[in-house]
Image (tube, rainbow, N blue to C red):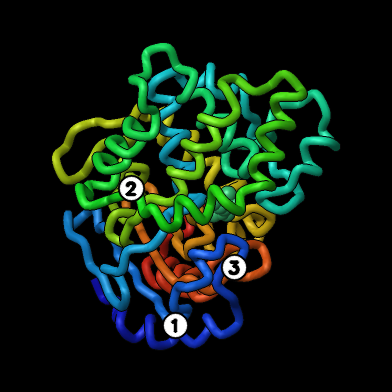
C-alpha cells in the first residue's frame, strides 16, 4: 500500500488548533489536544498499519453507541430494536432534548444521538435474558468485537460523566414521562455513563470498523460475531447520522460510514476494504474531531474509499 501515514499525521496534526477538547465532561478537559493517531485494518492483506498516537487510550464516548446498538440487535433482533428508535437525522446537537419535544410521540430519532442511545441501552438493561450486570455484558462484547482484551472502564471519567450528566438525566426522564422508557431510568443511565467511559485505542476501533466492513465477520479469526443485516444497517446509520449534523457534509466529502465520539475518536468502515480508527481530541462545534476528520478525508481519498464512487 502506497500510503505515507507519518506524513499525513504531520500534515493534519496542526488542524487540531482549530478545535477544543470537550470540557463539559471535566475529566475530558484534561486530555492533551496535541495528539493525532490512526490505525487501519487492511482486509485484503490482513494486517494493521498505524501511525502517530495510535496506541494512546482514550474514552470511547459516543462510539459506544455503535457497540450497544450492535449488542441490542444481537440480543433482540433488528426489527425489535427499530421499534424503539428511528433512523432519521435530528437537525439538533447530539444531546438535544428539543428534537424530542418537536417530534412529540415519536421514539428517539436515531440510536446515535444521546436520547436514542439511552433508549438502546435501556433495551439491554431491561432484556429478560440479560445477566444482572448489563454493563459487564456490554464490556465483554466490546472486548470481543474490538479484539482488545485491555479495554477497561475508567473510573475518573465515569464519575465525571455521572456527576455532570444532568442533560442526559433530563433526556432519560423525558422518555419516562412520555412512557417510552423501557427500563428503570437510573440503571439505564448508569450503564450509559459507564459505556461512554471505556478506554480504547485507534487499533480497537480499526478492529471494530473491520468487522463492520467485513459484513459482520471478525477478520482475525473468520468467525461471525454479528449478522450481515446488523452490519449493513449499522453502516448505513453511521453514514447518515454518525457525525450528527455533519453527516451529510462528510458523506459528500469522504463517503465512508463513520461514527465519532467526544473523546476525539472516529471509527470508519470502508466495505470489504478497511476498518479505520482515528484519535485526535480537539473537537469542532458539532463534537467531531477536527484533525481526525481532515486525516480521514486524506486517507479516504488516497485509498479511494468513497463508497459512492
Ligand atoms: N458521554 C457523552 C455524552 O453523553 C457522549 C457524547 C458524544 O460522544 N458525542 O454527552
Percent coordinates x, y for residue 98 in the rendering: 81, 43
Residue at position x 53%, y 52% in the image: 161
Does the numbered disc 3 mark a residue whose Cβ is under 8 Å from ligand 1?
A: no
Residue 34's disc number: 1
Q: Nearer the viewer, mark 3 or mark 2?
A: 3
Does the numbered disc 1 mark a residue whose Cβ is under 8 Å from ligand 1?
A: no
Q: CA distance from mark 1 to mark 2?
A: 25 Å
Percent coordinates x, y for residue 107 in the rendering: 70, 27
Q: CA distance from mark 1 to mark 3?
A: 15 Å
Q: CA distance from mark 3 to mark 2?
A: 27 Å
- Report the quarter where the N terminus lies: bottom left
- Say above or below: 107 vs 30: above
- Say above or below: 98 vs 279: above
Instruction: Look at mark 3 in the image and give the residue it sits on.
Output: 23
Residue at position x 38%, y 34% in the image: 135
Q: Element at badge 3?
A: loop
Q: Element at badge 2?
A: helix
Instruction: Look at mark 2 in the image and give the residue it sits on.
Output: 208
Amino acid at each position: 500500500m502506497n500510503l505515507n501515514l507519518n506524513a499525513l499525521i504531520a500534515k493534519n496534526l496542526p488542524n487540531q488548533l482549530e478545535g477544543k477538547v470537550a470540557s463539559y465532561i471535566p475529566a475530558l478537559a484534561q486530555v492533551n489536544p496535541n495528539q493525532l493517531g490512526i490505525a487501519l485494518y487492511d482486509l485484503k492483506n490482513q494486517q494493521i498499519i498505524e501511525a502517530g498516537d495510535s496506541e494512546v487510550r482514550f474514552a470511547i464516548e459516543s462510539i459506544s453507541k455503535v457497540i450497544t446498538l450492535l449488542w441490542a440487535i444481537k440480543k433482540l433482533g433488528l426489527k425489535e430494536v427499530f421499534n424503539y428508535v428511528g433512523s432519521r437525522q435530528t437537525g439538533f446537537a447530539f444531546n438535544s432534548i428539543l428534537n424530542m419535544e418537536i417530534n412529540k410521540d415519536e421514539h428517539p430519532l436515531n440510536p446515535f444521538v444521546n436520547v436514542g442511545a439511552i433508549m438502546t441501552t435501556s433495551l439491554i438493561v431491561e432484556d429478560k435474558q440479560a445477566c444482572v450486570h448489563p454493563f459487564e455484558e456490554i464490556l465483554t462484547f466490546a472486548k470481543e468485537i474490538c479484539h482488545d482484551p485491555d479495554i477497561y472502564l475508567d473510573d475518573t471519567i465515569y464519575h465525571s460523566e455521572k456527576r455532570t450528566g444532568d442533560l442526559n438525566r433530563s433526556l432519560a426522564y423525558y422518555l419516562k414521562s412520555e412512557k417510552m422508557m423501557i427500563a428503570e431510568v437510573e440503571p439505564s443511565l448508569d450503564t450509559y455513563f459507564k459505556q461512554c467511559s471505556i478506554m480504547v485505542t485507534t487499533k480497537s476501533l480499526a478492529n471494530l470498523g473491520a468487522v463492520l466492513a467485513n459484513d459482520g465477520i471478525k477478520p482475525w479469526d473468520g468467525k461471525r460475531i454479528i449478522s450481515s443485516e446488523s452490519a449493513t444497517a449499522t453502516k448505513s446509520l453511521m453514514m447518515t447520522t454518525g457525525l450528527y449534523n455533519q453527516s451529510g457534509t462528510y458523506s459528500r466529502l469522504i463517503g465512508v460510514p463513520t461514527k465519532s465520539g467526544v473523546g476525539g475518536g472516529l471509527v470508519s468502515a470502508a466495505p470489504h476494504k478497511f476498518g479505520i480508527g482515528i484519535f485526535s481530541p480537539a473537537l469542532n462545534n458539532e463534537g467531531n474531531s477536527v484533525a481526525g476528520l481532515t486525516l480521514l478525508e486524506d486517507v479516504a481519498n488516497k485509498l479511494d474509499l468513497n463508497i459512492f464512487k
